[in-house]
Image (spheres, coloured by chain):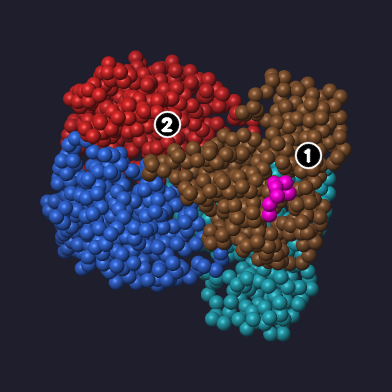
Chain colours: A red, B blue, C brown, D cyan
Amino acid sequence: MNFASDNTAPVAPAILEAIASANEGYARGYGNDDWTAGVERRLSDIFEREVATFLVPTGTAANALALAQITPPWGVVFCHADAHIATDECGAPEFFGGGIKLVTLAGDAGKIAPATLQAALSGYGALSPHQMVASALSLTQASEAGTIYRTDEIAALCDVAKKRGLAVHMDGARFANALVRGNATPAQMTWQSGVDVLSFGATKGGALAAEAVVIFDPDRATFFAERRKRAGHLLSKHRFLAAQFAAYLEDGRWLALARHANIMADRLAVELKAVGLPPVWPVEANLLFVALPRALDAKLRAAGANYYVRANEGLTLPADRVLVRLVTSFATKEEEIERFVNLCKNF
Amino acid sequence: MNFASDNTAPVAPAILEAIASANEGYARGYGNDDWTAGVERRLSDIFEREVATFLVPTGTAANALALAQITPPWGVVFCHADAHIATDECGAPEFFGGGIKLVTLAGDAGKIAPATLQAALSGYGALSPHQMVASALSLTQASEAGTIYRTDEIAALCDVAKKRGLAVHMDGARFANALVRGNATPAQMTWQSGVDVLSFGATKGGALAAEAVVIFDPDRATFFAERRKRAGHLLSKHRFLAAQFAAYLEDGRWLALARHANIMADRLAVELKAVGLPPVWPVEANLLFVALPRALDAKLRAAGANYYVRANEGLTLPADRVLVRLVTSFATKEEEIERFVNLCKNF
Amino acid sequence: MNFASDNTAPVAPAILEAIASANEGYARGYGNDDWTAGVERRLSDIFEREVATFLVPTGTAANALALAQITPPWGVVFCHADAHIATDECGAPEFFGGGIKLVTLAGDAGKIAPATLQAALSGYGALSPHQMVASALSLTQASEAGTIYRTDEIAALCDVAKKRGLAVHMDGARFANALVRGNATPAQMTWQSGVDVLSFGATKGGALAAEAVVIFDPDRATFFAERRKRAGHLLSKHRFLAAQFAAYLEDGRWLALARHANIMADRLAVELKAVGLPPVWPVEANLLFVALPRALDAKLRAAGANYYVRANEGLTLPADRVLVRLVTSFATKEEEIERFVNLCKNF
Amino acid sequence: MNFASDNTAPVAPAILEAIASANEGYARGYGNDDWTAGVERRLSDIFEREVATFLVPTGTAANALALAQITPPWGVVFCHADAHIATDECGAPEFFGGGIKLVTLAGDAGKIAPATLQAALSGYGALSPHQMVASALSLTQASEAGTIYRTDEIAALCDVAKKRGLAVHMDGARFANALVRGNATPAQMTWQSGVDVLSFGATKGGALAAEAVVIFDPDRATFFAERRKRAGHLLSKHRFLAAQFAAYLEDGRWLALARHANIMADRLAVELKAVGLPPVWPVEANLLFVALPRALDAKLRAAGANYYVRANEGLTLPADRVLVRLVTSFATKEEEIERFVNLCKNF
């Protein structure tokens, strides 16, 4: 019963096999190999346009490199208060960006409302050069609350952003999970709605360590290769990074893996709701939040369940409840869910 | 016939198997797993003292994080003119270090002489606060020329450095290759001779992507974890990074793999010398430099040989010769050498 | 009628004369002159302990250098939401600090309450190394709202900070204005209450361009000289910077200049209150905020009055009112106040 | 007898008077004043084109801001080995530039030869993204050796630079001294020869603390205002900075002050040569280098002479000689020179 994070899961077998298959003979290093070229072509196909792609081993690297690419050091990046870039990357965006500032915005269920962004932007612009410059918007898709932005929501946010000259980044550590839920193509969910650069995650979805920075307008990718190298994120035996991504994208595997994770989250939500523990936010990806009675929390942990408690910002919980996050993955088994729910049932 | 780099090689089979073996069930992320704890203990054993260890996916990350840890932003790091940190990391040390300066020193066969360091240091110290501060020495072991520093040479350099308050870093991307050649223990070749922090490479030696920063005095490791995280170099599925290192270190595999690479380099050197193409520097690790007739170079390439031409700094070559670097690895086969030498023979 | 800022004022005559007096013959550059040594001694006297002093030409430089000195790049600095460092320095702390993060706290009348700091700190500490590290507290004295922290308030805040290992910075751009209002010595208002480093402003108080970074424990000043130089803030003809500060501190001039500014603010407050325009926050230094009817605002501006409108964060104003900030200085004349108030009276 | 530096001199009386004259009434801060607008217009006149001008208090700030504006963080700046930016600014370019690298070039008499630049550039370009990117050339005019680049020499260097896409910076801390020697207009010596940005110094020439960054193509000045502010180099009482520059430029005063300094240097050179102490490099600005017998050096110092000893890089001196630098300024008096030379004469 491990619902701690999608990165406590192992590597999806097909991806591990792809690594093994790539382990034949010599290959040019640093991305000058056939696997990498293949992934680049594949991503252009998936996004229905020529894109510039850069593979890196971690989501923090993907996010921080992407933000640094679209924001000057005196730039402000707007993001949700619970965004991973703001809470869990130990200042990577600030470091890579040469001292940028993240301005965090409140928002129900992990999402920013266009009006909130608009209001925040109203405070920027007149104080040049005393004030930092509003430069970018970062959206997390799926959000940290397990919800997703619909295509029209993304477009509305990008519209507000673009009118003020902001670039738009999407943190897609769980992009596949969002995509299989929404009724949209990868292109519609990103550049066709106004997104400029995507951190396209594969690690949480089943890879060993593989993320892609996808820059939709290749002209905006100038010197990204130097930026990545200088951050130590250009792998020498790059074929093994590319092989992971190739296997992830092959034959819709990325969507199948995400679909399983989402279905597991849905089932968990439905069954927990049935026993009086409804999720506090809509369950739209592979994670859900529940207000557990503290005694049940103790019982579950004693039985070996693994998950994180989260600060209940914004939510008012009874004193005897604790907000917990439950994350499913491609590896989640139905038995885990049954066992977890049964423990809740008999409480 | 691939002698381009030790990172064109694949992953050593035992290391790939270790990754597969680790792919069972859930594991805590970010280094809180058993594989990581095991590697930490193992490295303390190997170095005969408690050390602080941090695993990262690339050598550039290891070097840049290590240097940033021991050097303030206004610090000068002395290194050989051909050091990887100075020539091939696109400014990673400068970026991670917040604007440090690398001062490069000349030196025969890729090595710095103590007197050269002493002379360079004589120019530092009196101009505070106008001048940057002499802060660290970085030694490459084995060197970019394929030579190694003997223990007494390291001690002599560290002695000069320590008298001026410099910290000492060793770029050990090919540490194993140096070690199996030198008559010294890992401890003797590092902290017992004055080295403070080691970039201990496994990737070139046979791993997929695994390097360790080993800080010999754990008290000097303060905030290194934050530094790594903030650089995007803390892998979420960390067990797979640790599993590589564990397999690399298991039962002396790292030394066996390096020994093979060195033996292949030795053989190549001996046989090339026999056909009138002696190495220009002593062959002490797994790479050698040869001044090839241009026509032979063309012939070898036409036959499929892969290697890099290098600028012949310091060396005077006849106009019809070109300096080439030949690198062997754990994966180099005797047949490759035979074929390469035969092509030279019949020239 | 210029109430726009204390830096629209000229230079206090005695300070300008001191610059002229220093303009005799040669003097060693970069702070190795007698004026500088004198200021250093004088500040140690004023603060009743040996302090380390560094003069710089701007308050932004003083603040950013001070914060960078006490905060690692992965550090979080807590400050009031209206703090100059957060709103008006275009990211200088983030730049000098190598990517630090300012976390802004709400607080009535420009001041942080200890409980607010405590609550903010409760969110830090458990997520290492994913979260940035709570590192420093910055207090603005006098505050941007024109209020001051009493000695016991500073001590209470520092107590919360110190228990969590935070260093404390005081932005004293208007330190003199605070001091002449509070019933405390310079020592009591700073290090004796727990402050580690002070940006001691003279520019707003009457200098041309002169601020001092005062580090109360000289052991914490290591490499500050290099930090200042490398930021371009070590003046070559340093005697003229020191001469300003010497004149500012001579015979209590700094306090006399501040007292005049405060008295002018008090008078403005009393007289505006008498005509129905009370200040929205206590007037404790040399600035006050008033909710002006928009028509009166227009009338005043038409008559030549100069001041800034401020966003009314936290305050609820009628739609026909606008929040304005009125700043007095050593140069403010009673006639200006009379004229301004008369315009309000006859409204 | 102070020949230590042109910044041991006081402020030129007319410049001090201009500061005093500006000390009337209120003025808008941060450069929104009439003095500043006037200086901006004046500089456009002097350079015969519309330029973007930014005033700062130090030469280090001017240089570092200028370089950061034209060089990305992964950029290499080529400069002479003795350039102030490389030896005396404690890493300011590296800090402001986010980790750029200065590559220093040898060159007789403080000057870079086009062939030397060409040779250095030949090592750049092929190793992307492993190598830092050749980005800028910085020329020091007058050089640290007291020589000057003629217009055709500048054009030749800029030609080499421009063909490789490098921007060109000129460190003109002693720009006036170079200009009054060369037979060229300010425009010819800068942008008409290919210079993109100039650090135009006034401090060494007679100001208190005033330097201008002159960007010849205003389109390249985007965000420079934010860059300056964020570095703490936007003075609040900016009129006093502008007033210095205005007085410096008024009626050719800058050229007259520089001419005096140069004449004093010429006289010193001629008279020292007459007593057997010829300058080691051509004397073309306001500084000269002489190889003094050590005993004479001691005698001069005992008599109160002030100057710096310099490392004799490149020069071979007899063991009993020491290389000293003698700097004159607008304030140098003939008597000082006579006294100095007499001490040498009677040696």
The secondary structure type at the circle numbered 2 is: loop
Mark 2 lies on residue: A83
For the residues beneath circles 1 and 2, the answer to whether they share a chain is no
| In the image, residue B257 above or below residue B185 | above
Q: How dense is the environment of label 1, judged by Cα within 10 Å: few (below 14), some, or many (20 and up)?
A: many
Q: Say if the magenta span includes residue A295.
A: no
| In the image, residue C276 above or below residue C189 | above
Mark 1 lies on residue: C266
- Viewer can see residue B103: no
Residue C308 in picture, x, y percent from top left: 72, 32
Q: With B179 as the anchor, is C133 left or right in this view? A: right
State which mark lies toward you, 1 or 2. 1
Q: With B144 as the anchor, is D118 left or right in this view? A: right
Q: With D346 as the anchor, is C214 left or right in this view? A: left
Chain of the residue under the numbered disc 1 shown in the image: C
Q: Image point 22% across, 59% down: which residue? A: B45
Residue C118 in picture, x, y percent from top left: 50, 40
In the rendered structure, which segment of residues is drawn in magenta? C178-185
Q: Amino acid at mark 1?
A: Asp
Chain of the residue under the numbered disc 2 shown in the image: A
Q: Which mark is residue C295?
A: none
Choose between C76 and C95: the one closer to the eye.
Answer: C76
Choose between D339 and D47: the one closer to the eye.
Answer: D339
- Viewer can see residue C219: yes
Q: Image point 23% across, 54% down: which residue? A: B41
| In the image, residue D221 above or below residue B334 | above
**Cα–Cα span, label 1 and label 2:** 46 Å
